[in-house]
Image (tube, grey):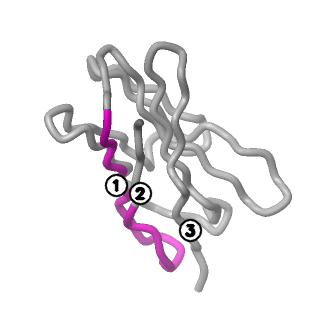
């Protein structure tokens, strides 16, 4: 079984920074794609950023230039460095791993941007 455990969420002021981490464990094969999604209250879950095992990245327009996704393949860990945070970035952030068309999700971590 594959498990994903996120960490690093919290409360931050507008303009601040946070780094999220997501460690995957279990039977993980390459190639795969890891990514971050978020869901704000009463809104649908949306893509934030993804990164392939080869390092190709993709970002939502709303976060491009402010967020950076990276991964450590040896540790099966993906990171999301978030900078210049805005109140509209407030959401539960979920980590996702896609391998062989199977999707695995983490439990989510809350990010709140507020003064």
**Res 5 → quadrant:** bottom left
Residue 6's label in the rendered image is: 2
Q: SS for tag 3? A: strand
The residue sitting at 20% across, 32% down in the picture is 73
- First in residue order: circle 3 vs circle 1: 1
In the rendered image, which residue does mark 1 sit on? 21
Q: Nearer the viewer, residue 11 or 14?
A: 11
In the rendered image, which residue does mark 3 sit on? 110
Q: Position of residue 12 (x, y in %)?
A: 48, 77
Residue extending furthest left? Answer: 74
Q: Position of residue 46 (x, y in %)?
A: 68, 41
Q: CA distance from mark 3 to mark 2?
A: 10 Å
- First in residue order: circle 2 vs circle 1: 2
The residue sitting at 27% across, 43% down in the picture is 77
Q: Is residue 14 magenta?
A: yes
- Crowding at mark 3 (Cα within 10 Å: few <14, some 14-19, many 20+): some
Q: Nearer the viewer, residue 21 or 80?
A: 21
Q: Quadrant of the N terminus?
A: top left
Q: Is residue 4 magenta?
A: no
Q: Which residues are magenta?
A: 7-26
Residue extending furthest bottom? Answer: 115
Q: CA distance from mark 3 to mark 1?
A: 12 Å
The residue sitting at 64% across, 69% down in the picture is 87
Q: SS for tag 1? A: strand
Question: Do tag 2 and tag 1 residues touch (Cβ < 8 Å)?
Answer: yes
Residue 91's label in the rendered image is: none
């Amino acid at each position: 079984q594959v498990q994903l455990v996120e960490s690093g969420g919290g409360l931050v002021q507008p303009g601040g920074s946070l780094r999220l981490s997501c460690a995957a464990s279990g039977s993980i094969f390459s190639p795969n794609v890891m990514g971050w999604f978020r869901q704000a209250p009463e809104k649908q879950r949306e893509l934030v950023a993804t990164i392939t095992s080869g390092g190709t990245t993709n970002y939502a327009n709303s976060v491009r230039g402010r967020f950076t996704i990276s991964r450590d393949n040896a540790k099966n860990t993906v990171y999301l460095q978030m900078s210049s945070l805005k109140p509209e970035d407030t959401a539960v952030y979920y980590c996702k791993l896609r391998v062989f068309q199977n999707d695995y999700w983490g439990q989510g971590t809350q990010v709140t941007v507020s003064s």
